[in-house]
Image (cartoon, rainbow, N blue to C red):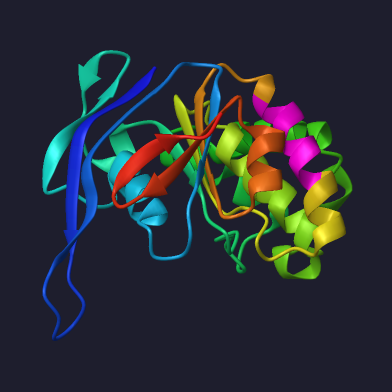
Amino acid sequence: MLELGNIVKHWQAPGAAPRVLLAGLNLQVDSGQTVAILGPSGSGKSTLLKIIAGLEAADSGQVFCQGQDISAMPAHLRRFALMFQDFALFPHLSVQDNVAFGLVEQGQSRSQARAQALAMLQRFGMAAHALGRVWQLSGGEQQRVALARALITRPRVLLLDEPFSALDAQLRTSMRAEFAQHISSAPMAVVWVTHDEAEARAVGARGLELQAGVLQQRW
């Protein structure tokens, strides 16, 4: 279970006064549950994900996972996975090595990691592309590789930041159904950030909207 307690974050543009971005925000996401968070650009959605992931510090408040306060825990020790809207794949690595990357970072041998990566790519229907380069793939294929890379490490929490914003409308519709199916098979808490309400309703058992730094229940 992921839990946020009274998260506060201020943001200051150059030459401007600081403003409250997150105003005592609270959130609980159970393992196996997907929560969708809506909000316009600049509302603080991406900052919230970075705080959860440990990539950015809150001004105050706490992040808990399975009841443990991990607020001061470095990002690489949290066993969380964050998927960015621009895929963030490594162009110099093969598709297989992109997926294996997290396992190698965790200390597995390269041969073991590659074997597991190939099995994961088969699950996503991408095994035929294992030795290719990610820049040779379509947008949808790159997004499958990004999710495969996120899931292979068996994260406790999966964070998705506008994962389909770079795809066309038709592909977004098919991809969100595919992603929801893959995610539902893993026992982790999922926070899915988007500005698209149709997407949020398709993937999120609960829907919240970030307004004036506070999460409001939508469904």
Residue 192 falls in which quadrant of the image? Answer: top right
From the viewer's side, name the closer residue of 89 and 206.
206
Please provide the residue range marked out in magenta: 175-183
Residue 61 percent across, percent down from the top left: 14, 36
Q: Residue at x 32, y 14 (%)?
A: 66
From the viewer's side, name the closer residue of 67 and 78.
67
Residue 9 percent across, percent down from the top left: 19, 52
Above or below, 79 against 86 in this view is above
Q: Can I make out residue 72 in this image?
A: no
Residue 15 falls in which quadrant of the image? Answer: bottom left
Q: Residue at x 72, y 36 (%)?
A: 202
Answer left or right for 210 relative to 18. right
From the viewer's side, name the closer residue of 16 and 80.
16
Q: Residue at x 70, y 53 (%)?
A: 143
Residue 152 percent across, percent down from the top left: 60, 32
The total number of labels drawn is 0
Quarter of the image with the C terminus is top right
Q: Magenta stretch containing residue 161, yes or no?
A: no
Q: Can I make out residue 151 in this image?
A: yes
Q: Residue at x 63, y 50 (%)?
A: 97
Residue 171 percent across, percent down from the top left: 84, 55
